[in-house]
């Protein structure tokens, strides 16, 4: 028998009976739970839950939300339901460094990431060849301090037009305005090297080499008005030695950045990331 699959996420006060109520509601819909993750964040006094389940053919996400509405109202649940079978639409932004973008596109092509890239946006022309090769729409949006408001307005119009659920800054080297970050709150992910704030500015890997660091890494996070300080989704490090050159550090850093960004995007698309103030709850498999 054909099935439909859904992912339910919720946050609430840590009240008794939430899991029982959700499980009962899923059963009443004729569904079966395939995965469940939960966390009680005691400092924030918030409860977080992610439930993946399958239901009978013809069941829709809106019908599931309606079925859960009485439970959500009774327990004060901030509840969301998505169709797990649909491929989320994303926009990738890139400047001249294309390693993170290429890795992202590859992981989508082989099916590790389930998503549809509806546009590649860049303030440089170099990424056009990648978009053309992949058959993806390329949007060239050059920017100067004077044209920034107009450029960001055009970008927001593109997000609206394409119905993109997520914006991925795959080494997009322009600072987004406070207004744009507010409008993209919780649906824009960035990647940066983990040297911040120790090695700010140009050539961070050269600075790291000069200081003789033994670990380099990368951090992927949600975009906020505070530059490179949004809620962290994913991080990783790579060990290096005195034998590694400055060029080696750059190569290792590119690889780490690419992998960390892809893992962060995967967690977000699978609804495994829930915001908890300035932090995140990230449920693994």
Image: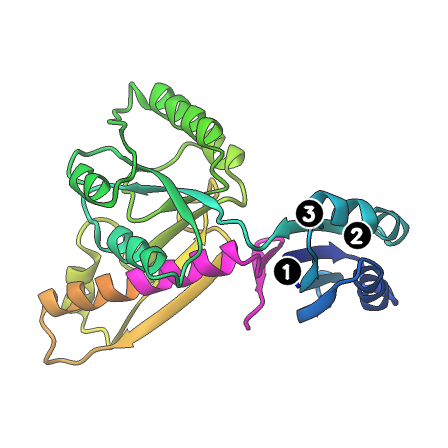
Residue nearer the viewer, 43 or 32: 32
Query: Are dots 1 and 3 in contact, CB under 8 Å?
Result: no
Q: Quadrant of residue 285?
A: bottom right
Residue on which the image places disc 1: 2
Q: Residue 78 at what x, y percent from top left?
A: 75, 49
Per the model, the C-alpha gap separating discs 3 and 2 is 17 Å
Q: Is residue 32 magenta?
A: no
Q: Is residue 189 above or below residue 161?
A: below
For the residue carrying disc 1, how many other residues have a C-alpha within 10 Å: few (<14), some (14-19), or many (20+)?
A: few
| Residue located 21% across and 50% down the image | 98
| Helix, strand or loop for disc 2 | loop
Residue nearer the viewer, 26 or 16: 26
Magenta stretch: give its range: 258-285
For the residue carrying disc 2, how many other residues have a C-alpha within 10 Å: few (<14), some (14-19), or many (20+)?
A: many
- Is residue 41 in view from this perspective? no
Q: Is residue 22 above or below residue 121?
A: below
Q: Residue 12 at what x, y percent from top left?
A: 77, 56
Return the residue found at the far front. 1
- Is residue 10 in view from this perspective? yes
Q: Using residue 6 as the reference point, say whether residue 195 is left or right of it.
A: left
- 1 or 2: tag closer to the N-terminus: 1
Residue on which the image places disc 3: 61
Residue nearer the viewer, 25 or 198: 25
Residue on which the image places disc 2: 77
In this rendering, the label closer to the viewer, 1 or 3: 1
Per the model, the C-alpha gap separating discs 1 and 3 is 16 Å
| Residue located 28% across and 66% down the image | 256
Q: Using residue 186 as the reference point, say whether residue 5 is left or right of it.
A: right
Q: Quadrant of residue 152?
A: top left
């Amino acid at each position: 028998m054909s099935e439909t699959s859904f992912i339910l996420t919720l946050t609430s006060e840590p009240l008794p009976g939430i899991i029982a109520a959700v499980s009962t509601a899923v059963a009443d819909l004729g569904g079966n739970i395939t995965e469940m993750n939960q966390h009680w964040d005691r400092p924030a006094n918030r409860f977080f839950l992610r439930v993946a389940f399958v239901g009978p053919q013809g069941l829709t996400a809106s019908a599931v939300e309606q079925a859960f509405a009485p439970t959500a109202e009774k327990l004060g649940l901030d509840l969301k339901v998505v169709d797990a079978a649909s491929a989320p639409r994303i926009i990738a932004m890139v400047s001249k460094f294309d390693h993170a973008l290429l890795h992202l596109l590859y992981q989508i092509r082989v099916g590790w990431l389930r998503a549809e890239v509806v546009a590649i946006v860049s303030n440089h022309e170099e990424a056009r060849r990648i978009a053309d090769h992949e058959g993806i729409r390329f949007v060239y949006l050059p920017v100067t301090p004077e044209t920034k408001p107009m450029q960001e307005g055009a970008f927001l119009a593109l997000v609206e037009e394409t119905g993109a659920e997520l914006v991925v800054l795959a080494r997009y080297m322009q600072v987004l305005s406070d207004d744009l970050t507010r409008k993209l709150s919780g649906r824009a992910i960035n990647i940066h090297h983990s040297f911040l704030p120790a090695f700010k500015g140009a050539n961070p890997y050269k600075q790291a080499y000069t200081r003789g660091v033994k670990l380099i890494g990368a951090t992927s996070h949600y975009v906020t008005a505070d530059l490179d300080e949004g809620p962290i989704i994913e991080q990783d490090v790579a060990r290096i030695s005195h034998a590694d050159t400055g060029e080696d550090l750059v190569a290792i850093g590119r690889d780490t950045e690419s992998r960390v960004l892809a893992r962060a995007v995967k967690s977000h698309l699978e609804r495994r990331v829930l915001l908890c103030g300035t932090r995140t709850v990230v449920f693994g498999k």
